[in-house]
Image (cartoon, rainbow, N blue to C red):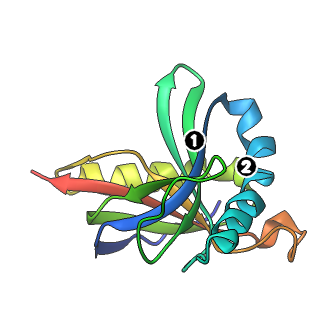
Amino acid sequence: MQTHEIQLHNRNEQPTAVVEATLPVAQIGPWLSGQYGTVAKTLAAHGQAPIGPPFARYHPVAEGRFRVEAGFPVATAIEAADGVRPSTLPGGPVAATVHIGPYDAMESAYGALASWVHEHDGELAGDAWEVYLTSPAEHPDPSTWRTEVVQPYRIH
């Protein structure tokens, strides 16, 4: 089992360009795989480019269902176009860790972040997101995939 080193950061709010869908857990992976190219093409068509790796943010809506935002950080807020809309990743304190391995084995990373926050008299403060540091297209071996899991929090 992977040991997760927790990193603490104080982030500024980050403008993003995203597509969004509400999906059951089983459909999220297949849906995500087609979305990043769509967002990148729309940005390019409007003279913009991502300023960082792709991410996905998961907002629980019901048991086993999430509203998923998939996209990229951008330098400035975008105008909505072709199904791509502006959003933000929140500013403030976050705890983060890097998971190495397949996406379906990330539960321990989320658990490590939640444990750290609770052990330090804190509480989770919003929905987490995943930053995909390794492209599966460039690195087909899932055991080499690197994903940063970021969790906003606050200390009491």
The percent coordinates of residue 120 (x first, y second) are 20, 57
**In the depicted view, which residue is nearer to us: 81 or 66?**
81
**In the depicted view, which residue is nearer to us: 140 or 108?**
140
Residue on which disc 1 sits: 68
Residue on which disc 2 sits: 32
**x 75%, y 31%: residue:** 26
**x 59%, y 75%: residue:** 50
The percent coordinates of residue 21 (x first, y second) are 62, 36
**Contact, CB < 8 Å: mark 1 with mark 2?**
yes
Q: Residue furthest left?
A: 156
Q: Amino acid at mark 2?
A: Leu
Q: Residue furthest top?
A: 63
**x 67%, y 32%: residue:** 25
Give the answer, above or below, for where 51 lies relative to 77. below
The percent coordinates of residue 3 (x first, y second) are 55, 67
- Please tell me in which quadrant of the rendered image residue 103 appears: bottom right
Rounded to the nearest angstrom, the CA distance separating label 1 from label 2 is 9 Å
Crowding near the residue tagged with mark 2, few <14, some 14–19, many ≥20 C-alpha atoms within 10 Å: some
The percent coordinates of residue 20 (x first, y second) are 59, 42
Q: Amino acid at mark 1?
A: Val
